[in-house]
């Protein structure tokens, strides 16, 4: 199984961003959040390395997954390669997880790069004679949050991509799906901001972040499990 | 393998109210090219999907290389190669990368992958272009690459779904020649679906004809001809009198005689000597210029079977 996943990863890496239009679209889509998170925010926030403001970096893997998962899954159908892939000895799970590892892994590596770049920006902008690093808690929370968010969107992306007939359709649907919950939650947070502030103060910022991460982990696990249940030859060949 | 490569027993598959496959029973012997003929939508592709374990049957069962397709689909897929209705190649990868991917899937070692790639790409005249991305290749070249991919891991059985569909005459002929060579050289069983009768006639030792999911006939092309139309003799000449035609019709080996202008068409019950019939015509005063032994084409047989089924 591990070697089969490795084979799928090998193939996915070979065609990542090779398809027409996807390279430019990816650069443009990722450039804005990267500039915001790696340059603008750390320039503005004085204690960037010690605050949860760096959680914004989680938007980078999110954007990568948003772009790569539809291309990886709906793209197989659109480019008529899915049938042949399913006719091989590769297990369903190896195909699914191989593709997910590449999308989520790429986003995760980009997040690491952005976090490093943001640290350089923060130290340059707020130089006080010594180099500041992320505290262990902040770094772990940032990485955990980024990974979970990427996994959550990847799970949703697989489910949506398997129903979409084209990559573009899948990306549009996934974009709407991903943007809706933060907008609703943001509105709720705005309306209940005082109660939420009291709650966070009561449990502490780190505990509040951990609670959110636990909720994200449960949702991501649920979506990836649903994607694994849906990603079966007998169903895929009929779509 | 001693037994048949494929054994299908009452296999059915419904898609809602539509019977895509209706109690199909069939055996495909090992080591030959088996033609699976039928018009569009007759159930050919569904049959391949069922045999590869990609679809679950509504009824019946099938064994491929001795493995039950429902219980051991993974074992079937590991031992077979497939070229489905689309070539299924990654167009932004090079020819070499496409084959390397399938070599890795089938766990061929690096050395074996390389030598097998060289062997197959060389056979298809693609070795020199192996490092090109295939997006700009012609359809014929892609189809050859897809066949090479299906054969890469030396499968015992290869499914080819309309391998020459959409190719020009020259490319289709080249693919057919390559298939014939490979079948002879590699000792592989090919399960070939097509609605190109000339192709089936040239390549297949046994054929099955399917329509609306039902098997209409199976056998050697000559057996099918015999079942539908016997052999035929065309005689060109002059002076074919009514008496001469009556004499011909009275012969036991003759099933029918048709006359048009200076051409006689004599339908025989079985293949045999033609000389006595020609002598009979000459003795009755006819002047014979040309005698052509003819047999019905597979296309005629196919059309007749389709007509009977209607």
Image: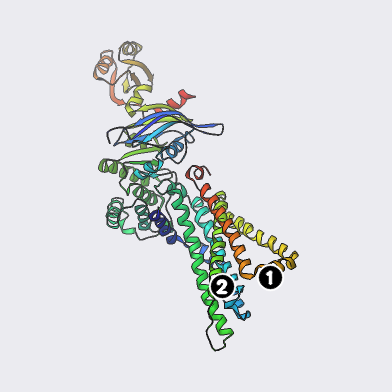
The residue beneath circle 2 is A138
Q: Quadrant of residue B83?
A: top left
- Estimate the x, y position of residue B248 in percent, counting from the top left: 31, 13
For disc 2, the neighbor class at 10 Å (few under 14, some 14 to 19, many from 20) is some
Which mark, by number, is residue A141? none
Dot 2: what SS? helix
Q: Quadrant of residue A174?
A: bottom right
Q: Which one is in front, B245 or B22? A: B22
Q: Is residue A165 left or right of residue A12?
A: right
> From this viewpoint, is residue A39 visible?
no
Q: Is residue A232 left or right of residue A170?
A: left
> From this viewpoint, is residue B175 visible?
yes
Please tell me whether residue B187 is drawn above or below residue A24 in the rendered image. Answer: above
- Farthest residue, direction bottom: A129
- Estimate the x, y position of residue A49 in percent, counting from the top left: 57, 78
Please tell me whether residue B25 is drawn above or below residue A91 in the rendered image. Answer: above
- Tell if the residue under mark 1 belongs to the same chain as the one under mark 2: yes
Dot 1: what SS? helix
Q: Quadrant of residue A56?
A: bottom right
First in sequence: mark 1 vs mark 2: 2
The chain identifier of the residue carrying mark 2 reads A
For disc 1, the neighbor class at 10 Å (few under 14, some 14 to 19, many from 20) is few
Q: Which one is in front, B124 or B272? A: B124
- Farthest residue, direction front: A202
Q: Between marks 1 and 2, how big is the CA–CA gap?
A: 18 Å
Rendered residue at 59%/70% (across/down)? A55
The residue beneath circle 1 is A201
- Estimate the x, y position of residue B110 in percent, counting from the top left: 30, 57
Rendered residue at 52%/84% (across/down)? A131
Q: Is residue B205 left or right of residue B88?
A: left
């Amino acid at each position: 199984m591990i070697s089969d996943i490795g084979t799928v990863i090998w193939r996915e890496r070979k065609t990542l961003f090779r398809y027409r239009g996807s390279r430019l679209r990816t650069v443009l889509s990722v450039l804005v959040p990267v500039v915001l998170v790696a340059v603008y925010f750390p320039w503005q926030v004085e204690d960037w390395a010690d605050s949860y403001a760096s959680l914004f970096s989680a938007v980078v893997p999110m954007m990568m997954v948003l772009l790569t998962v539809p291309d990886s899954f709906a793209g197989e159908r659109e480019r008529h390669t899915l049938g042949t892939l399913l006719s091989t000895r590769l297990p369903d799970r190896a195909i699914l997880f191989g593709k997910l590892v590449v999308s989520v892994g790429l986003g995760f590596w980009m997040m690491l790069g952005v976090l490093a770049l943001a640290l350089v920006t923060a130290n340059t902008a707020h130089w006080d004679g010594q180099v500041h690093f992320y505290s262990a808690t902040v770094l772990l929370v940032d990485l955990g949050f980024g990974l979970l968010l990427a996994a959550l969107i990847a799970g949703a992306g697989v489910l949506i991509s398997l129903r979409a007939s084209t990559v573009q359709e899948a990306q549009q649907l996934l974009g709407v799906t991903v943007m809706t919950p933060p907008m609703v939650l943001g509105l709720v947070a705005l309306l209940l901001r005082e109660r939420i502030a009291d709650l966070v103060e009561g449990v502490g910022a780190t505990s509040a972040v951990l609670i959110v991460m636990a909720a994200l982990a449960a949702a991501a696990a649920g979506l990836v499990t649903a994607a694994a249940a849906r990603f079966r030859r007998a169903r895929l060949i009929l779509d | 393998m001693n037994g048949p490569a494929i054994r299908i027993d009452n296999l059915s598959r419904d898609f809602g109210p539509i019977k895509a496959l209706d109690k199909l029973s069939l055996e495909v012997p090992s080591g030959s090219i088996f033609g699976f003929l039928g018009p569009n939508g007759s159930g050919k592709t569904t049959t391949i999907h069922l045999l590869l374990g990609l679809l679950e049957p509504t009824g019946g069962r099938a064994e491929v290389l001795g493995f039950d397709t429902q219980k051991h689909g993974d074992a079937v897929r590991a031992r077979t190669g497939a070229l489905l209705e689309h070539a299924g190649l990654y167009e932004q990868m090079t020819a070499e990368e496409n084959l390397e991917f399938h070599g890795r899937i089938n766990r061929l070692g690096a050395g074996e992958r390389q030598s097998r790639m060289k062997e197959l790409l060389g056979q298809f005249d693609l070795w020199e272009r192996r490092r090109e991305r295939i997006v700009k290749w012609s359809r014929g070249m892609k189809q050859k690459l897809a066949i090479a991919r299906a054969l890469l891991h030396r499968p015992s059985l290869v499914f080819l779904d309309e391998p020459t569909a959409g190719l020009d005459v020259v490319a289709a002929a080249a693919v057919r020649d390559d298939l014939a060579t490979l079948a002879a050289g590699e000792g592989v069983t090919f399960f070939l679906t097509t609605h190109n009768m000339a192709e089936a006639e040239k390549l297949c030792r046994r054929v099955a004809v399917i329509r609306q999911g039902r098997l209409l006939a199976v056998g050697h092309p000559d057996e099918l001809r015999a079942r539908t139309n016997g052999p035929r003799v065309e005689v060109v000449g002059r002076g074919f009198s009514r008496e001469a035609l009556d004499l011909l019709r009275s012969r036991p080996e003759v099933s029918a005689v048709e006359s048009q202008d200076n051409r006689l068409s004599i339908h025989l019950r079985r293949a045999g000597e033609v000389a006595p019939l020609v002598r009979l015509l000459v003795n009755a005063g006819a002047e014979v210029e040309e005698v052509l032994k003819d047999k019905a084409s597979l296309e005629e047989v196919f059309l007749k079977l389709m007509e009977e089924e209607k």
